[in-house]
């Protein structure tokens, strides 16, 4: 049985409600009286005397200072966000300004509701390890109040042997700071095409922009548009659309400290305002050296959209939208290198079939070639990938997920031809890993799900979410897994 191949390890990651970040809080922001309530609060803070205000601020920092880095500057930043509501901001002392920021702040527990859907890649730092060990970065989907998802991390060491050591995740968390990024003209063009925008203004902007451009160049191009174009009836709407599509691309930076497990990638644009879900990380062999790339699902509360991030060091991340029919649904996973000169990705654009998509010359993901449709009893509702393909001598190992009766998720496996990944050359007829009695209960019951494993020292190391309540780990002997796979029907 395929289920006998996976060996569960003892270590488990569980949601930690102490992992909190400071977010802006505006009293009454869910009601029409937000301006009145916010203004009244600021007026009441302004009435506090300097001595009372200083004592109050000291109490706040004593209570929360050890839970957050640089709390005072965070309060000042939140003050800057609401200072437009203050009639005479120049009359407020520094203490009063910090207090305003404190009253307009709250803690948010990033993983208080659930922790799930991990992926695993080699860590940028491999120093100080014993022979036979590998340090890995584990990405995690963190879910907090309101089902809002962000991307967090853990650091672990695999080996020697089947030993797993996970680094302590305690300590103040740090949100990445949004910065400008050099953007791709092709992605802007693809976004305009998907929006059905093809007129003189959009064509002129694309013609004037270089292949890679920064904020200053973009603004200079817009400012230089001819008046007779801007004055047309569609002019303002087109310019606004161009700005909105461009804003989907951005960059996020973290300082060298804190360590990876204390960094949080937080939603930064409207399309991802309700979550960054199910990041599938892979270490990609790029032309200029290895690059960490990941695909994830952006969710705004109503619609989903594919996103890709890239980083050379897991400190500076560049985020871009994914375009084209191959990126039209959840579950895109990148191959770790070009194959036959093509950039490839697994996808599930129809919602139920694993497909193979190729990026075209305009950075759009083409309509996919079907690889595997629901066929086995444990996957008849839908199938999808569990992360990027893993290269082996026998072929591309693809971990899959299938959904069966009672919406029960299980993990399976396919094998694709190394040179022609359109060809499925092997598969498991049974699930490799399914929820056992200890894993079936949780935030989303009866689910095991992974966003990517790694091969080390002859074993497949597989992190997986268990019912979206916790993260478990399993190992599978790679040779035994490959030997258990058989050609699919029609390829015997």
Image (cartoon, rainbow, N blue to C red):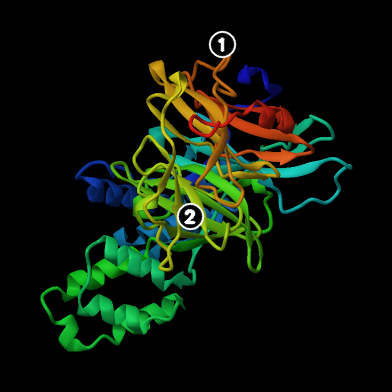
Q: Is residue 188 visible?
A: yes
Q: Quadrant of the N terminus?
A: top right
User: Measured from the top left, where is residue 275 in percent x and y?
Assistant: 41, 43
Q: Quadrant of residue 4?
A: top right
Residue beneath label 2, please? 308
Q: Is residue 47 visible?
A: no
96 with respect to 246 (left or right): right
* On screen, residue 90 above or below 442: below
Q: Nearer the viewer, residue 51 or 5?
A: 5
User: Measured from the top left, where is residue 409 in percent x and y?
Assistant: 47, 24
Q: Nearer the viewer, residue 430 or 120?
A: 430
Q: Which of the two labelled residues, at mark 1 and mark 2, occupies the earlier sequence position?
A: 2
Q: Quadrant of residue 6?
A: top right
User: Measured from the top left, where is residue 487 in percent x and y?
Assistant: 57, 31
Q: Quadrant of the C terminus?
A: top right
Q: Quadrant of residue 414?
A: top right
Q: Residue at x 49, y 53 (%)?
A: 75
Element on which disc 1 rests:
loop
Give the residue at the far left of this rendering.
233
Give the residue at the far right of this rendering.
131
User: Measured from the top left, where is residue 251 in percent x and y?
Assistant: 50, 62
Residue beneath label 1, please? 437
């Amino acid at each position: 049985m395929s289920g006998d191949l996976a060996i569960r390890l003892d270590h488990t990651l569980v949601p930690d409600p102490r992992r909190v970040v400071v977010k802006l809080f505006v009293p009454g922001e869910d009601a029409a009286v937000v301006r009145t309530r916010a203004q009244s609060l600021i007026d009441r803070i302004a009435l506090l005397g300097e001595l009372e205000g200083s004592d109050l601020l000291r109490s706040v920092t004593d209570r929360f200072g050890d839970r957050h880095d640089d709390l005072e500057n965070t309060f000042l930043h939140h003050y800057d966000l609401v200072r437009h509501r203050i009639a005479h901001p120049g009359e407020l002392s520094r203490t009063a300004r910090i207090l305003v920021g404190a009253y307009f702040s709250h803690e948010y527990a990033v993983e208080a509701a659930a922790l799930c859907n991990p992926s695993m890649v080699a860590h940028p730092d491999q120093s100080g390890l014993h022979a036979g060990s590998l340090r890995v970065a584990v990405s995690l989907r963190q879910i907090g109040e309101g089902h809002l998802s962000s991307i967090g991390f853990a650091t672990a060491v695999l080996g020697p042997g089947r030993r797993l050591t996970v680094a302590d995740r305690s300590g103040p968390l740090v949100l990445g700071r949004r910065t400008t990024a050099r953007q791709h003209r092709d992605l802007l063009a693809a976004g305009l095409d998907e929006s059905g925008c093809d007129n003189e203004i959009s064509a002129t902007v694309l013609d004037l922009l270089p292949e890679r451009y920064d904020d200053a160049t973009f603004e200079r191009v817009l400012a230089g548009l001819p008046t007779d174009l801007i004055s047309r009836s569609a002019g303002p709407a087109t310019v606004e659309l161009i700005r909105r599509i461009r804003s989907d691309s951005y960059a996020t930076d973290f300082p060298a400290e804190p360590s990876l497990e204390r960094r949080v990638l937080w939603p930064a644009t409207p399309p991802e305002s309700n979550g960054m879900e199910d990041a599938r990380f892979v270490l990609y062999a790029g032309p200029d050296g290895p690059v960490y790339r990941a695909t994830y699902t952006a969710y705004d509360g109503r619609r989903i959209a594919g996103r890709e991030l890239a980083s050379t060091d897991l400190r500076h991340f560049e985020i871009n939208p994914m375009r084209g029919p191959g990126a039209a649904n959840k579950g895109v996973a990148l191959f770790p290198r070009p194959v036959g000169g093509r950039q490839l990705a697994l996808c599930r654009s129809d919602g139920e079939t694993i497909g193979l998509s190729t990026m075209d010359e305009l950075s759009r993901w083409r309509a996919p070639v079907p690889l595997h449709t629901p066929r086995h009893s444990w996957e008849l509702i839908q199938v999808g990938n569990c992360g990027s393909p893993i290269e082996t001598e026998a072929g591309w190992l693809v971990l899959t997920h299938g959904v069966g009766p009672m919406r029960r998720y299980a993990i399976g496996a396919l094998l694709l031809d190394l040179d022609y990944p359109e060809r499925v050359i092997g598969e498991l007829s049974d699930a490799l890993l399914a929820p056992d009695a200890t894993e079936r209960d949780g935030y989303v019951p009866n689910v095991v799900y992974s966003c990517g494993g790694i091969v080390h020292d002859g074993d497949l190391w597989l992190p997986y979410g268990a019912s979206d309540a916790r993260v478990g780990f399993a190992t599978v002997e790679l040779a035994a897994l490959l030997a258990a796979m058989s050609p699919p029907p029609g390829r015997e």
